[in-house]
Image: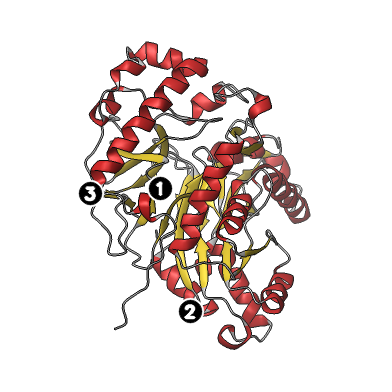
Amino acid sequence: MARKKYLIWNEEIETMPRKELQKLQLKRFQETVERVYNKVPFYKKLFKDAGVKPADLKSMEDVAKFPLTVKQDLRNNYPFGPFATPLEEVSQIHATSGTTGKMTVTGYTDNDMKVWAEVMARVYTAGGTKKGDVIHNAYGYGLFTGGLGFHLGAHEVGATVVPVSGGLTKRQVTIMQDFGSTVLTCTPSYALVLAEAVEEAGLDPKKDLKLRIGFFGAEPWTDKMREEIGKRLDLEAFDIFGLAEIIGPGVSVECPAHNGLHIAEDHFYPEIIDPETGEPLPYGTPGELVFTTLTKEAFPLMRYRTRDRTVLHAEKCECGRTVVRMGKIMGRTDDMLIIRGVNVFPSQIEDVLLSFPELSPHYIIYVDRPKDMDALTVEVEATEKLFNQGWDALKEMEGKVKKGLAEALYVSSNVNIKEPFGIQRSQGKAVRVVDRREL
């Protein structure tokens, strides 16, 4: 069997001996602690409430003394309270939706943008992308960080980027064929949509397309789904991980060994904690993923709880990289759902349902994955008054609810309105979400 070829963008950092890397992390961690303490008021208060100060961080063992940050801290300081630089020094702003209508806002200085380009260049290179490749970027552009993150990295590695964003699938297939795209970037579920469109167009990926690499993330997906995408589009599929609060895409990526996602540890310090106690857990133990940004200027975060469950491994990879690897995300420690790359909270759905007086407050949310693509279905009860108006009235209401959910969630859904008492009552805590995806 031929030996796999491994490409590395920044060998000095990505293959640095662990002891040297830990020295660099400690220095940058200390700088981050000083930065947030002196420039972000809510962090100063958080540190004082926890009885710690920057001088207490003398070694990496001291990290656990410092308080954890949660998403609610960002919401409480909306929009620019968490920024550590004046707005005039912020060159770009992104945001994600939240449960209360308040977005989570992130900012980038010029230097932050350079860091983003650097870590995205590592992502591309890990999968074998290089100058001369044509990158078909079908991640969304705008406030969502996906499209622009991949765009930055494409420029950094010297590849040609086609910024098609999402939608207009038949046109995307034509572009991939006519432009000779060699790299595909999008959510895994949309990759399958593209694969279906390729087949419907009567094209043979091996003969009619030039794709050889794909980078897929922003939603949970299985190795089975990887095989399906790889086979149907004739490419090697790589898993990527990122979150807007930390930088966007670029936090970690697989190499061709496919034995975990390499974290850019010189910029993002990872920890695993017990989600119940907050206590740090050793490598190899599953728990909640926590990140500290080590080089962010505009929007630094200290020990940020991602709510993602995974495991970290520190052994050197066969590709030569020495940075820590994270396993695939096993699930969430809160109630957030990721539907086709979009964060969806049950409370958002509840808000929409309760805005219609014709509906009762009894509902169930189902998440399935037919044909390896996420599907959201909401079942809700009609009031007696609505139900007695007949079939046409129920169907009209389903359309109104479906439209309301799409506007609130940015994700399409199916809506089934049941008869009064058509949803089983619970004797204890109500089961609101049934996630039937096999992750």
Q: Which residue is mark 2?
A: 231
Q: Foreground: 420 or 297?
A: 297
N-terminal-most mark, 1 or 2? 2
Q: Residue at x 51, y 49 (%)?
A: 118
Q: Amino acid at mark 2?
A: Lys
Q: Quadrant of the C terminus?
A: bottom left
- Relative to 269, does residue 79 appear above or below in the rendering? above
How many marks overall? 3
- Gap in Å between the C-alphas at discs 1 and 3? 18 Å
Element class at badge 2: helix
Q: Which residue is mark 1?
A: 264
Element class at badge 1: loop
Instruction: Please say if the residues under marks 1 and 2 sit with CB atoms less than 8 Å apart.
Output: no
Q: Amino acid at mark 1?
A: Ala
Q: Quadrant of the N terminus?
A: bottom left
Picture disc at residue 284: 3
Of discs 1 and 3, which sits in the foreground? 1
Where's residue 346, x and y in %?
54, 40
Residue 274 in which image quadrant: top left
Where's residue 65, x and y in %?
28, 22
The answer to whether one can see residue 423 in this image is no
